Amino acid sequence: MASVEADIRPRRKGRPSVSETAAPSLVDILNLVRTGRATTRQEIERQSELGRAVVADRLGTLGELGLVDESELGAATGGRAPRLVRFAADRGRILVATLDQTALGVGIADLAGSLLMEHHEATELTQPAPALAERLVTLFRWILERQANPPLYGISISVPGAVPDGGEVLFQRATPAVLPSWESFPLVETLVAAFDAPVWLRSSVETMTMGELHAGAGDGHRTMLFVKVGKRIGAGLASNGELFRGAQGAVGLIGSVPVTAGGQSGTLEAMAGSDHIAQEGRLAAERGLSPALADHLRRGSPVTALEVAHAAQMGDAAAIDILSQSGRLIGQVVATLANMLNPELIVLSGSIAQTNDILLASTREAIYGACHPLVSRDLRVIRSQMGSSSGLVGAAIVAAEGLFAPSLLRDWIMAGRPQAHPLFQQLKARIADRSPFEENAVRPPDM
Amino acid sequence: MAITGLGPHGERASAPERVLLLPEDMARARASGFRVAIVLHTTASDWAKQQLSGIVGTLGNCGVAVIEVVDCAFTPEVQIEALDRLISEAPDAIISLPVANSKVAAAHARVAAAGIRLVLLDNAPTGLLPGKDYISLVSADNFGLGKIAAEGLSPHVPHGAEVGVLGYDADFFATNEREIAFVKWMQVNRPDLNLRVQRFSTLADAGPATRALLGAHPDLAGLFVVWDTPAIAAIEALHALDRRIPMVTADLGHDAAIALAAHEPLVAIAAQQPFRQGETAASIVVSTLLDRLPPAWIALPGLAVTSANVVECFQTVWRMPAPREVLQKLSLVRATT
């Protein structure tokens, strides 16, 4: 990485050029406006500690680049109404996708991460990677046909497993080995070649964490622990407003923690996940322990975890027991994390947690019971406000945060488009130069 | 028939049977005195009338009073005004067909925020979430409709031919899904064909869009139009150009049924079931008012209609006899002289 930067930055001699001196303040000002920390010139001057003339000059530049908009007036507080400075989220678009075991979701968002369009279809992740990638490209092309303007700034994809890229915050410069069957397929390079935009890959728990932090229950919080309960159980951590990605990008794989309940031992996923809840529910219905679930069978519908959750909500004793047990086990594991990390907020997500108060209540009880008093003093444990769109929204936020991260932004802002970033240019050149021999060696050499 | 598509947020489809009402449910509903309002895009079309009679009839069976039926005339402003007015009436539930996407999203969100159960028909504005902003969405399996149309057209187009797709240039869940599914089926099963897409933004534009498509690709050997009304406009445009090419569409309207019975130019239609959709929407409302949890998305399978089964499908869909012209074309009645 260091050698790459040395390659692309010529040695500086003498006076720095204007672009070099302006870029840092442009980056600061744009991010103050983008994150809503400053909405008028006066606030920008105060927060950035830059002089009035510099702020006016930089806002002029940002206006020309189309990244801020000063056309609206704010409320007057005595005297003239101040001109509002707003981030022009419509300046660019971000293509987003979620890949999971059985479905492919695609959408398009503005630069603030708001979804403008989404489509989901059934697919099998086990199909050959080139076929899946081709479908993804086809759907992206279809969306761009419908929403051709404004220009594309980035692509962000949520994938079902951890993204082992060393916790990178910049866009992907090679395809990491996300899934065994994808190991020999250059997904990132294919997308860059097809759409000429930087690509981010994140695990589904990571994108959902970002979605929740920015557009759901975590809005306004800095430290949040996100727990997804489904067939698999995983966690994501937002620390100081940013996604914590660990050494390998493999944070929060808590489903494999061993737990014990009722004399049985197993992983948290196997002992508390939705498959376990459904299985226990079916047994309770067949044994006549649960009138509500037996009634469900009588209506000819299968008993899934959601039915168990609903029966519990209606007061069915057997169903309440099943969910309480799951909640307790999840809570015990999450309490350990909370004691270590001291979050402001713990969000439970997944369709069972979101439609059911019992699982939430028993998880809460276990967390509060096992947390240090200082940790649990102001800790809130709530359910997700986002539902199934959080993956797409979160993917959009990942790209937006990446695009405007100071370390990335400073190298493209003067050109007004992220494609001008030298590392992206380098990636494109490498893709263009790829010899037929290298095309088969999918993972380009480490940089 | 299996549902092939996914819901607006990737939900798995549930069958209408999931909200089956048992006699004891109906008895409980009758004892509760619920009030429901209905907000439709239009009440003028056959499709809307059928759906409405499915809703109102089923609610009647359950002793639920329909306090108002609003015709929004496809206008977002009318819908927003109607929803806000109905919120102040505080019905137990509102059934609404959103006439636009982002424009009407906030007004629909206010319904749920006011504690009124909201059941959506046909599409969910982007950003609204099931469970939080609405109870459930009922729609046709639009992805399945696109697939049925593609399967119906395929045998009528020769190898290597060009096939036209006349799509709707608006961000609408239903028409988007049909177009994506049609194109996907063709790309997977008929990779030999070349698809040519053209879109119209208003109904009046459907004829000119057809002429533009034919002008750019004079060798078209097949055409898919995303629903029947523009398909009829396309048939007229083709007629004026003296062109005859096999066509498929979705929705079994009156004129489309006649064209299908003649087997020319329509060769297949993927039909929705508006009456059943209305019955299902009403069952969802009653289920949720009885505190049962309906699924986030219920989809009704489409019917694959050809000239061979157009009479019975017409009866299934519209609950009335097929038009006389259809019966005549199929020699089921004597032609009038």
Image: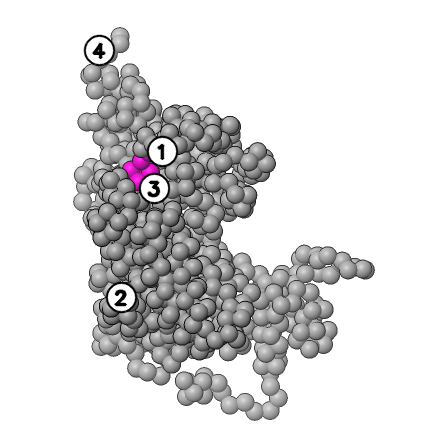
Residue at which label 3 appears:
B298
Residue at which label 2 appears:
A262
Element at label 3: strand
Amino acid carrying label 2: it is: Gly
Nearer the observer, A61 or A247:
A247
Residue at which label 1 appears:
B25
Amino acid carrying label 3: it is: Ile
Disc on the earlier residue, 4 or 1: 1
Is residue B237 shown in magenta? no
Instruction: Report whether residue A128 is seen.
Output: yes
Q: Which of marks 4 and 3 is in front?
A: 3
Magenta span: B16-21
Q: How crowded is mark 2: few (under 14 residues within 10 Å), some or many (20 or more)?
A: few
Q: Which residue is drawn at 29% across and 18% down?
A: B321
Q: Which of marks 1 and 2 is in front?
A: 2
Disc 4, disc 2: CB below 8 Å?
Answer: no
| Position of the C terminus of chain A by quadrant | bottom left
Residue B334: numbered disc:
4
Asked if labels 4 and 2 share a chain, the reply is no
Chain letter, disc 2 residue: A
Element at label 1: helix
Disc on the earlier residue, 4 or 3: 3
Inter-mark Cα distance, 1 to 2? 38 Å
Q: Which of marks 3 and 2 is in front?
A: 2
Inter-mark Cα distance, 4 to 3? 42 Å
Amino acid carrying label 4: it is: Arg
Magenta-colored segment: predominant secondary structure: helix
In which quadrant of the rendered view does residue B303 lie?
A: top left
Q: Which residue is drawn at 26% across and 59% down?
A: A276
